[in-house]
């Protein structure tokens, strides 16, 4: 894009220099003015395309950042709930040393975890 812009600017300046030389009554002046206007339109279009590309790139970067945050939250939630579940099972087994779970809380925790392993 940079080379294209430089080429267009060179053409624009060259047409500007030719306009300085051409007389006001000359028929070529209208053609040169049209050429200069066309080059200006191309420069504006080039700038517009560059701005759109930058906006799209920024949008993609923002979406990637949001996705990384979502993934981090998901991983963190999974890790915390897994650790709490493991801690609860260990505490339940320590509380009920004889192998029979007698507490209501212990039964609830184990019944919530054991069926998951059987499936």
Image (cartoon, rainbow, N blue to C red):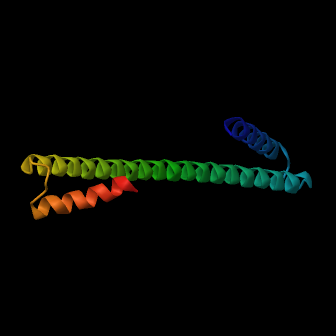
Coordinates of residue 42 in the picture (x, y in percent) = 74, 51
Q: Residue at x 88, y 54 (%)?
A: 31
Apparent side of residue 58 relative to residue 6 in the rendered image (left or right): left
Q: Which residue is drawn at 72% across and 52% down?
A: 40
Q: Which quadrant of the figure contains the C terminus?
A: bottom left
Q: Count the marks: how many? A: 0
Q: Which quadrant of the figure contains the N terminus?
A: top right
Q: In which quarter of the image is residue 102?
A: bottom left
Front one among 74 and 82: 82
Apparent side of residue 44 relative to residue 105 in the rendered image (left or right): right
Apparent side of residue 12 relative to residue 96 in the rendered image (left or right): right
Coordinates of residue 89 in the picture (x, y in percent) = 18, 50
Coordinates of residue 108 in the picture (x, y in percent) = 19, 63
Front one among 75 and 97: 97
Apparent side of residue 53 relative to residue 114 in the rendered image (left or right): right
Q: In which quarter of the image is residue 9?
A: top right
Is 8 located above or below residue 95 in the figure? above
Q: Residue at x 13, y 56 (%)?
A: 101
Coordinates of residue 73 in the picture (x, y in percent) = 33, 52
Front one among 68 and 19: 68
Residue that protrudes farthest toward the right in the picture: 27
Q: Which residue is drawn at 59% across and 51% down?
A: 51
């Amino acid at each position: 894009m940079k080379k294209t812009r430089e080429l267009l600017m060179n053409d624009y300046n060259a047409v500007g220099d030719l306009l300085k030389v051409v007389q006001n009554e000359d028929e070529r002046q209208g053609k040169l003015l049209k050429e200069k206007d066309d080059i200006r339109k191309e420069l504006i279009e080039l700038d517009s395309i560059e701005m759109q590309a930058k906006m799209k790139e920024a949008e993609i970067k923002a979406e990637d950042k949001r996705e990384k945050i979502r993934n981090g939250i998901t991983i963190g939630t999974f890790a915390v709930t897994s650790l709490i579940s493991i801690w609860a099972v260990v505490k339940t087994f320590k509380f009920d040393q004889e192998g029979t779970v007698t507490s209501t809380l212990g039964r609830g925790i184990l019944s919530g975890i054991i069926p998951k392993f059987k499936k």
